[in-house]
Amino acid sequence: MIEELDAGAEAGADALGPAALLASIRSARSVEDAAAAEQLDLAAQWADLHPPESIHSAATFTVAGCEHEEPIAGPGAPLVAEFCIAELGTVLGTTSVSAKKLIGHALELRHRLPRLWAQVHAGRVPSWRARAVAEATIHATPSLTVEAARFIDAQVAAVAGRIGPAQLDRLVAETIMRYDLAGQNPAADPEDGYLHVDPRHVTIHDQDVHFAGTVRLEAEVDLADGLDLHQALAHRAATLKALGSQESLDARRAKALGDLARTQTALDLFQHGHTSGPDGQDLPVAREVVLHAHFDATLSGDTTVFGPTGRLEEGQRLLLLDQLRSWCAESRTKVTVKPVVDLNEPKDAPGYAIPDRIREHVVLRDRVCVFPWCGRPARGCDVDHDTEYDHHADAEGRPQPGPTHTDNLAALCRFHHRLKTHTAWHYDMVAPGVFEWTSPHGHRYRRDRTGTTALDPPDPGAPRIPSPRR
């Protein structure tokens, strides 16, 4: 029956028939893959134009939970000036971190995985598959030498376009392990092999908060600890069910983990009389979490009526009033209600220092870093003077050009604050909370509470804005 319908569509020269539609989809994918390959090549060329200079450090990735930073590509790949990343990201409509990954992947492929790079440009391997391999080789632990990367390239390039993503991930991991095992026996001297790397970790993905108010947890622990944790969660989940809980087993296990985090460790220690550690310092409290929730409220007589939904600053997510009430029902939860801040009423202060009341105003108004496409929460950002504060104006009897006033202040994460200070990037606040940015090459963007909008493109023949020397 399907073949008959297919034949009928072709006989009628129907452009939207199944065969023609599949051919069009395949053609569109080929065009998309070719464009993505070209984008990788152009990103590498952009990096070539921007080597690190004396005032521009090399771009790196900050490693969560560590004190060191990683280069954006492995050993043997060229370094890139950190501030060139932002303009590429804004042109592509992505964050600076995403642009950094694009450049890092391009350099990793071109310089350390040349066979895979060639396969991408020959159309045999989609760029997203190649970038997945590059991501693994860049952040491998311990870091891969040029020789190790070439070994992986030789093993993976020929089949990267013919297997699924999960198989590709396993192949890369197995190839890295085979290379390690092909050398000196790592068990003979752990300091020379992979066994000296401790894989244990517990990672809370608190930047990816679900609308239900949940976060994902990932951990790798000792086998004995894992089995003990499993037993503790199973016991607590069974207890909750016996007490009448109608929730699923998964939900009860998740709740048990929260109960364990809040009470078990501190309870056991204090029951045994341990109120301080070996060094005499007080033990940390069992739970200390700060969340910032915002709800609209109206007065009905003498009663305050809250709206059913609000906003949680942590994760920039929707928050249900019922969910907040359940959190506050916990007896050990401390709730602090702060005064309402009128964002329509500008505030100022003498001097350069920014008082807490003005900082809170800026944080609530901007919500996130106001650089185009950036989404870092404003509460962890710097507060920047748009027009620079003149520390000598008062002493010399001149008007202050950059007052500490909410109309002259904006939330900028540390990277984009440094970018604005040390490069030709600049912005103007055209209305409270509305910023118009101009890049060194003349690209313009409007950033407000709804997001980022690209404005008129620059004239290709216009001269580049020189970087200021501050």
Image (spheres, grey):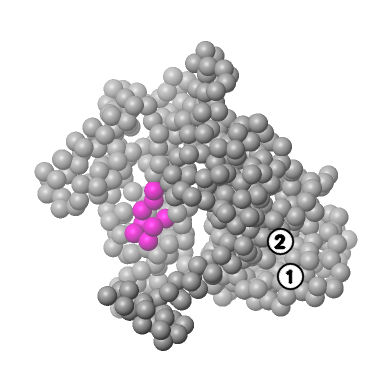
Locate residue 322, reporting x and y percent. 28, 63
- The residue that appears at 48% across and 44% down in the rendered structure is 168
- The residue that appears at 62% across and 62% down in the rendered structure is 34
| Residue closer to the observer: 137 or 190 | 137
Can I make out residue 108 in this image? no
Amino acid at circle 1: His
With respect to residue 179, does 260 lie above or below? below
- Distance Cα–Cα, label 1 vs label 2: 8 Å
| Residue closer to the observer: 342 or 293 | 293
Question: How many residues crowd around disc 2 within 10 Å: few (fewer than 14), some, or many (20 or more)?
Answer: many
**Would you say the residues marked 1 and 2 are in contact, meaning their CB atoms lie under 8 Å apart?**
yes
**Horizontal side of residue 106 vs 248, given as left or right:** right
Locate residue 149, reporting x and y percent. 62, 36
**What label sits on residue 87 in the rendered view?**
2
- Residue to which mark 1 is pinned: 443
| Residue closer to the observer: 427 or 107 | 107
Q: Give the farthest residue toward the top.
A: 188
Lower position in the chain sequence, tag 1 or tag 2: 2
* Range of magenta residues: 209-216
| Residue closer to the observer: 430 or 241 | 241
**What label sits on residue 284 in the rendered view?**
none
Q: Quadrant of residue 284?
A: top left
Question: Does the segment drawn in magenta span residue 361?
Answer: no
Q: Quadrant of residue 452?
A: bottom right
Look at the image and tell me in which quarter the C terminus lies: bottom right
Q: Secondary structure at mark 1?
A: loop
Question: How many residues crowd around disc 1 within 10 Å: few (fewer than 14), some, or many (20 or more)?
Answer: some
Question: Does the segment drawn in magenta span residue 214?
Answer: yes
